[in-house]
Structure formats: structure tokens, C-alpha cells
Image: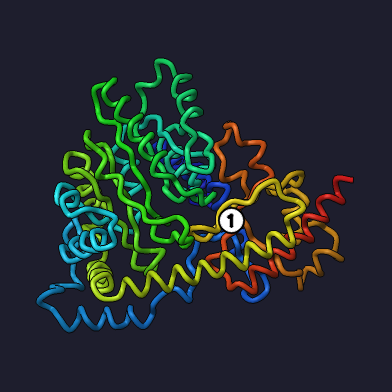
Amino acid sequence: MSEVDCLRRSLAPPAFSPYGRASTSPSPVNRMMAGFARDFRDGVDINLGVGYVNERTIPVDLLRRAMDAIIADPVRYRQAFNYGGPEGSPNLIDSIGRFLVRTGWLKEETLASKRLIIGPCGATSVLDALAEIFAPGIVVTSDPVYYVYANALERKGFELLATPEDEEGIEPEALERRLSALGERLGELAFFYVVTVNNPSCTILSEARRSTLIGLAASLSERFGRRIPVFFDLAYELLIHDPRVGARRSALGEDPLELVYEIGTLSKVLAPALRIGYLLGPPGPLMDAVVQKTSDTGFSAPLFAQEMAAWLLDHHIGEQLERVRAGYREKAAAVRQAIDAELGPYLASCRGGRAGFYFYLTFSRIETCTGSPFFRYLSRTTGDPALDGPPERLGPRVVYLPGEYCVDSGGALMEAGRRQLRLSYGFEETEAIIRAIRLMGEAARFALAQQG
């Protein structure tokens, strides 16, 4: 070994921040998805784990027309291929506002009293900004948790107060008990973070429950003499496709203490690659800090993508929304029928199918966690060639998100999480999803046989 090789091996890693040190170890979901991605076989393996939208819902022709429109009008869409301002494109800010008023989500007078800003890279970048601008503290959220953001918050030093939900969202009595148990640490509360159509469970937060959470945050803010904001993540709000849910309204109109903020995205209804996410709420230091974080991250979201999104909102969002909702409504019905037929006898509960594109399954006796017989059957790692297939030609594999990654570690749902999974009916076509559910039925019978 050369002297340079010896020196290179002897050097310690750089001096990382706590977040940097935590990030050197990939999260469990990161490891699992990377493992499958390395040798995933299109047309053979079936991915029900990713939260990707279905390719058929992406309006490619409209995107092409949007690009042509902004090129053809350099006065309205000025310097569309240059840097933009950190607050976001004025065109897009106005278009989103008009859209929210037109759909009845917001009243004009409410919108006029708020500030709307565009994140640098989708709604996730807005969430990342919040984790940067707040001092680490305790975050109130639901259980099951939005695992991607939950993991990120914990890496940045936050602690989750994840509270189980019922059919309307976070269960108030359970939350009151958890808050009371904090004792003197109650003053460490940083903010509330609630996904209005929960990922992974697709529970639709009721407006009554939403009001309860706002009232609780207001009471705590008054008690401690500082604002404890409530962030409602609307990621799947536009994808409520069950007509029985009825019209819904923004929480910003019931916010006398100006604690409420809404995080929106166009990824689920237009195209994820546009990376359009926004934050809407009362003007003030918090909004100023998020805008500065956007500037620090990269000046702005790509301006041409913002202008394309503005054009689409102004001209075609109505027809696009109906097409997307109808598509997912149809898929949800077919997938639910397959779940009932193939997995019904093994399930304790099945949630979802009314909004977004997830079902959240809880099995009665079958564990779904990594390493379980159920998981090994679907990943073709049982060790039995008759079940797995030969190494050079493994049988079809099914990727899903185990519930163990979706529940708060150490929380009340840990045991149940070992018997749960999130199934996405977004990305794959319906026929492939039904094939995967049949394979899950086989995996369930294999797992029960292993239990004896």
C-alpha cells in the first residue's frame, strides 16, 4: 500500500453538522427503495410502494402548449428562462390565487389578507425550509406519520408528538393526553403539521377536527405568549375523488390569531416534474424567513416551469382536474374490489380509496415488515427456488411500503405497524395492480402456513 493510500485511509471524515451526521445513514425507506431500484424489471416486477402519479394523468400535450405559449408571449412571461425572484413568479402567484377563489376554497377578502409564496423545488422544499427556520422542538402530527418528512424532521433535531388518528383525523382526546404528559416540556412545542388527506392512510381530515386543532394551537399560543403555527399540508386535497365528501373550504378564514398556513402543490394534478409548491398564510417574519431560504437554496423555482403552471391554471385546470379525479376514482373502485376478493379474509381494516391514491391495510395476523414471510414471498427472498424462481429468472416481485416505516417509532401503533402496509394505486396500471394483489393473497397464505 502506498503512502498516499495509507494517509487517505487514516483521515477522519469531515466535521459534519448533527444533520450531516444523521444523513450519512440512509433512512429505512431509502434503503428499501434503492435496493429494489437497482434491479427492478419493468413489465415483470410491480411497484406499489412509490407515491408517483400515473403517467396517463400527466397532460403532455398541454405541457407542450404551455411551453409554446410562454415563448410566444415574452411580455407577459418575461425572461422565462432566466433566474426568477425568491418570492415566486407574479404570474403564478396570481394564477394560484384566482384558482383558489374560483374553486370556492378561499374567499377573495381572505386571499387579500394573506401572502402566497412559491417554494424553490415543490412542496417538499417548503417543508424543508420550515425545518430550517424553526428552532428544533416538538412537532404535533398524526400517527401514521408522513414518513418522508417525519424522518427529515428527526434528522434535524425535532421530536415528533405523533398521535393516532380515527376516521376524522388526529383524535383530540388522545392528543390532549399526550400534550398533558409533556409536563414542563410543553413549552418546547414548535408547530403543528397535519396532512389534510393523510399519507399513508388517506384519512380525510374533517373540518370539525381541523377547527379543534386550530383552537388548541390558539390556546397554547396564548398560554406561552408566542405563536405556535399550524401547517396544513394540502398535497392530496385536490385529489379527493369521492363525490360524497362534498365541498371543502380553507382553514385560513377561521384564524383570528393568524396561526394557520397552507402548503399546496400542483404535482399531483399537473406534473411532479414542474416542482411547483407554495405556502399561503399571514404575512410576517415566518414568510420572510421562508423567502430568504428560497433565495439561499437557488434564487427561485425554475421560472419557465412557474410560467407554464400559471398558463395551465388560467386555461385548462378545470378539465385536467376532472380527468385526473375520474381516473383515480375508477382505479380506486377496481383496486378495492380486488383487495376485498383476494385479501379480505386476512384483513382487520382497509382505509383509503376516497382521495389520493393509497390504500392502507391492516392485517389481522400477518406481519408485513421487512424480513417477514409475507415480505420475503413478495421480494422473492424465501430461499425456496420453487417459490422464488431461479436466480437468473426470479418470479415477479411486488414492492409495497411496510407499515413499520409509517408509524411513530416507540409510539402506540408500533405493534400494529408490523401488520400494516401502504399500497399505491397511483403509478402502475390497474391490471398490474390487480396482479400484485393476487400475489399478496399468495403471500398471505404462505405467511399463515409458516406460522403453523
Using the image as rendered, state which of residue 78 and residue 352 is in the foreground: 352
Q: Foreground residue, 186 or 170? A: 170
**Outermost top residue:** 184
> Residue 208: x, y in percent?
40, 40
Residue that appears at 31% across and 71% down: 317
The residue lying furthest to the right in this view is: 452
**Residue at left 54%, top 53%?**
30
Identify the residue shown where x is 21% and y is 57%.
Answer: 299
What's the residue type where badge 1 is placed?
Answer: Phe
> Residue 82's image quarter?
bottom left
Identify the image quadrant of the C terminus. Answer: top right
Element under disc 1: strand
Q: Is residue 135 visible?
A: yes
The residue wearing badge 1 is: 359
> What count of labels does the image hold?
1
For residue 232, side relative to residue 9 (left or right): left
Q: Quick check: 163 above or below 313?
A: above
Q: Position of residue 265 (x, y in %)?
A: 34, 58
In the rendered image, residue 434, in percent from the top left (x then y), is placed at: 67, 69
Residue appearing at x 70%, y 70% in the figure: 435
Residue toward you, 8 or 34:
34
